[in-house]
Image (cartoon, helix red, strand yellow):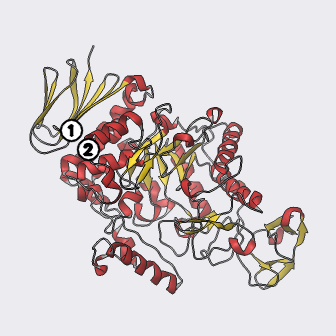
Amino acid sequence: MTRRRVWAPDARAVELALGPERYTMGRAPGGWFELELGDDRATADYRFSLDGGPPLPDPRSAFQPEGAHGPSRPVDYSTFTWHDGAWRAPPLATSVLYELHVGTFTDDGTFEAVLSKLDHLLDVGVTAIELMPIAEFPGVRGWGYDGVFPYAPHHAYGGPSGLQRLVDCCHQRGIAVVIDVVYNHLGPSGNVLPAYGPYLTDRYRTPWGEAVNFDGPGSGEVRRYFIDNALMWLRDYHADGLRLDAVHAIIDTSAVHVLEQLATEVEALAAHVGRPLWLIAESDLNDPGLVRRRDVGGYGFDGQWDDDFHHAVHALLTGERSGYYADFGSIHHLAAALRHRFVYRGGYSAFRGRAHGRHADDVPATRFVGYAQNHDQVGNRARGERSSALMSRAGLHVAAALVCCAPFVPMLFEGEEWGATTPFLYFTDHTDPELGRAVTEGRRREFAAFGWPPDDIPDPQAEGTWLASRLRWDERHEADHAELLGWYRDLLRLRREDADLTDARGDRLEVTADAEACTLVLRRGAVVLALHAAAGSARTDVPSRAQPVLVWPHGGVRVTDGCAIFDGEGVAVLRVVA
């Protein structure tokens, strides 16, 4: 026998719909309804009808084979044969993350197609892929942050079996898998949760509308819904970690915050399955409490995205000062990020018009993820420009060296390693015409306020916007792209081979910067990174016994007599010899 269950605390009656047939479900404690089915109905597609209303998909649907508006299909996770029994992910501190969007990473845009690129990732030095949200969202293309069925791998990507195969094959090749999950809001189209119960609340607002109800009446089952979802990805799909989107928009006034509860339960699951499981947060608060240990009052997450590091690198190497980049731009901002994790640690932020952040020096730097690009920083631009369109050729090499040699966990964004020229635009596929039109017009209004002609803003709903965002893999063999790819490969090989570049001890890190010369020297044990981020010539002191290991551009950087001499923008990775 098979049991179907659904939580619908306000419903008087619930029916299970199997095609045109209806079966009355029995009431169970706690607002649940359930029904046992014979084995002949165990695999049938189904919906639920509440109080005689139209049939709706299951809030905990494991698969939506016809998309967000179709029926739910049960999944028996035990039928997949795993081959990764000996797999154990390495510590996050020693990992190299690679953020990718399944729908644009390859022309096919599927889980299966990602497998064809694993050789490339391994050759570069990637040890973990981070999948942008893969839970079912409306249509066939989109970023995934408007998902409405958190338990269902997207049907257009290959569904549950496709994801299981991707994770299994990655593990066999020595690559960990992190899944981006969205627990701060739900998408506007196809969201059935409010029909079933108090999943959302109007007591709080987020940039995307009503907040998830983590602390009001009925919130016990809502918390259970999202925590069970997290455990499912880690347990049933063998994922090695989760990246939680915008946790600053998760509002919870409970004594035990839902994020702390999640970290506690994931830690228990890790002990049970006998392998490390990572939790990585994105937050706009510059609050290290997310990654502090729970025994000293933190939530105990393993990692946190560090936007301050990104902003410092980007503003310095592009010269941009609009929006939040107005708070950055000096090489001293970069030095502060390298030395203190955050640039804003309680000081005044002109962009925010208030004090921002708090000190994080007591937290190991390896609990922060550092990057020069990610989906947000590229895709939220009007034209989706990557660093390859915004930085000089030298700047791309400097940014790469900073990401790979900084004391943080490095993360690359798909195609970054060869300076991909394709944009990463914002794209959607809403089947509701009015919603699609509203998204298109809203995007144009947003950027018109910054002086962009509306007709110059790519239409998120147009298929061509998505197609333009797909990587062009053939360009990585072209001269300049191949050179940058080799630079990343060399940097990550050095990081892999030299223990100083994964050492979390703060007393082995030294940073000096000269704003006038626009030079910076980062020392981590015996490894020294020296850079010049401006035109013209400059020189900076380096340890007298430091010998060049990697230099760019060749002939444009010389190291002699304890001094690095630059003819323009450039970077040198050195090693102090005994």
Q: Using the rendered image of the protein, determine whether residue 566 is visible from the camera's viewpoint.
A: no
Residue name at image x 28 percent, y 55 percent: 387
Q: Quadrant of the N terminus?
A: bottom right
In the shown orientation, is residue 145 left or right of residue 323? Answer: right
Q: Is residue 533 above or below residue 63?
A: above
Q: Residues within 10 Å of mark 1 (few under 14, many from 20)?
A: few
Q: Nearer the viewer, residue 373 or 178?
A: 373
Residue 204 on image: x %, y %: 62, 64
In the shown orientation, is residue 573 left or right of residue 324? Answer: left
Q: Is residue 274 above or below residue 207?
A: above
Residue 206: mark in rendering: none
Q: Quadrant of the C terminus?
A: top left
Please, which residue is most extreme toward the top here? 578
Q: Using the rendered image of the protein, determine whether residue 433 is visible from the camera's viewpoint.
A: yes
Residue 430 on image: x %, y %: 51, 78
Quarter of the rendering containing residue 40: bottom right
Task: Please name the residue that numbered disc 2 is placed on.
Answer: 330
* Contact between labelled residues 1 and 2, with CB atoms less than 8 Å apart: yes
Residue 30 on image: x %, y %: 86, 62
- Tell me the CA gap for discs 2 and 1: 7 Å
Residue 3 on image: x %, y %: 84, 65
Q: Please, what secondary structure does the residue beneath circle 2 have?
A: loop
Q: Please, what secondary structure does the residue beneath circle 1 have?
A: loop
Residue name at image x 46 percent, y 40 percent: 368
Q: Residues within 10 Å of mark 2 (few under 14, many from 20)?
A: some
Q: Nearer the viewer, residue 393 or 79?
A: 393
- Give the amino acid at mark 2: Ser
N-terminal-most mark, 2 or 1: 2
Task: Please name the residue that numbered disc 1 is placed on.
Answer: 515
Quarter of the rendering containing residue 45: bottom right
Residue name at image x 38 percent, y 63 percent: 379
Q: Is residue 332 above or below residue 112?
A: above
